[in-house]
Every structure is written in C-alpha cells, then in structure tokens.
Amino acid sequence: MNTAKIIILTAPSGGGKTTIAHRLLKEFPGIAFSVSATTRARREGETDGKDYYFLSDEEFNRRIEAGAFIEWEEFYGGSRYGTLKDHIDNHLKKGYFVLFDVEVNGAKNLKRYFGDSAVSIFISPPSREELRRRLQLRGTENEKTLKLRLERAEMELEQADFFDYTVVNEHLESAYAQVREIVAKSINNQE
C-alpha cells in the first residue's frame, strides 16, 4: 500500500472536519470519500453506504473477527466506528485519492497504517467554549453525550502534534482555504 494516496482529516466532534470534507469532495473530483462503518443509530437524513455503513453489533463483530477493518474504535455510549479495508482498496484500485473524515484515535491508527503515503490534518476549534457552542447548536447531543464528547475533546486536543498539519477553524472560509492548499499540494506531488 505504499503507493496509497490518503488524506486524513481529524478533529474533535464539532471541530468542522465533516463540513470541510464535503467541500473538498465537491471541489476535487479525483478524491473519493472513505465511508466508515458504525454501530450507532442512523441520524435523520443519513444514507447507508453514503454517510456510513450502518452495521448491527453482530455484523460489526463478524467483520472484526474476519480482519475486515483497517482500524476501529468504540466510544460515545458504546457505538463503534471503523474503516473497512475492501472499501478503501476499491477506491485506490480506481485511482482515487481517498479522504478520511475520522475521529482522532482512528486518524492516528490510519496514519500509522499508511505511513508516509498519507497526509494528516488536525482541525482544531479556536477554543473549548466554541467547541461546546458548536456541539450544542448541532442539537444531536443530550447532556450526558455532550459531556462525554467534551471530555474526549480535551484528550484529543492534546494529540494535535501527532499529525502533519494543524489548522485552527475559527472561521470556516479561512480554515477551508488552508486545508484546500495542503490537499492541493499533496495531490500535485503524487500525480
């Protein structure tokens, strides 16, 4: 896999990585999105196979035992998320760059797996207060899960130095421009 063309975006929940990832996908037709598998419940408007592969706990366990994941993690009330090997291999065989939008531990595991053939970008909120505000505005968290996400974010923010680049997302346009420049440079260096 040392010829892989991998772009890893990571951030604490609410950091803006998904918004930035969607913009990159619209702008760069040669980038394919890595759809993660998850055991969490589907949110309104999400599509199986597009946003996530929604798997039962039993199916997720079967795939773990079969060695089907590059990486997987469990968090937020027992929900699990993972990256399926065959999904990534299919994109790479078709010549795509693959964009990952994953949480921090998953991103670290992907960076270790792909090594120098991956560029990793940590998107940081400008402050913990702003991160809390963004998570509350999403309207998807109860007090318990909000507290868990914020506690996890504290640990994740301390790991930013593990990644190749850190972009502070104070203003979306500025953060996107910085990420876009990193991605464009990576693509141009590998084509």
Image (cartoon, rainbow, N blue to C red):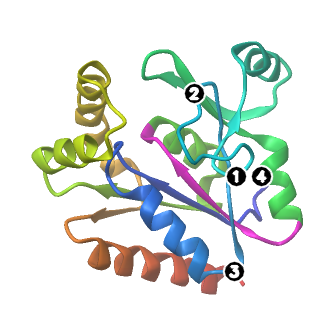
Mark 2 — residue?
41
Drawn side of residue 53 relative to residue 161, left or right: right
SS of the residue under disc 1:
loop
Which badge, 2 or 4, comes first in the chain's sequence?
2
Across and down, in percent, residue 41 comes to 57, 27
**Range drawn in magenta:** 94-104
Mark 4 — residue?
88
Picture quadrant of residue 72: top right
Within-10-Å neighbours for mark 2: few <14, some 14–19, many 20+: few
Which badge, 1 or 4, comes first in the chain's sequence?
1
**The residue under label 1 is which amino acid type?**
Lys
Q: Which residue is drawn at 80% across and 48% down?
A: 87
Drawn side of residue 9 relative to residue 124, left or right: right
Mark 3 — residue?
29
- Quick check: is 101 in the magenta stretch? yes
Q: What is the spatial separation of the Cα atoms under label 1 and label 3, in whole angstroms?
A: 16 Å
Mark 1 — residue?
50
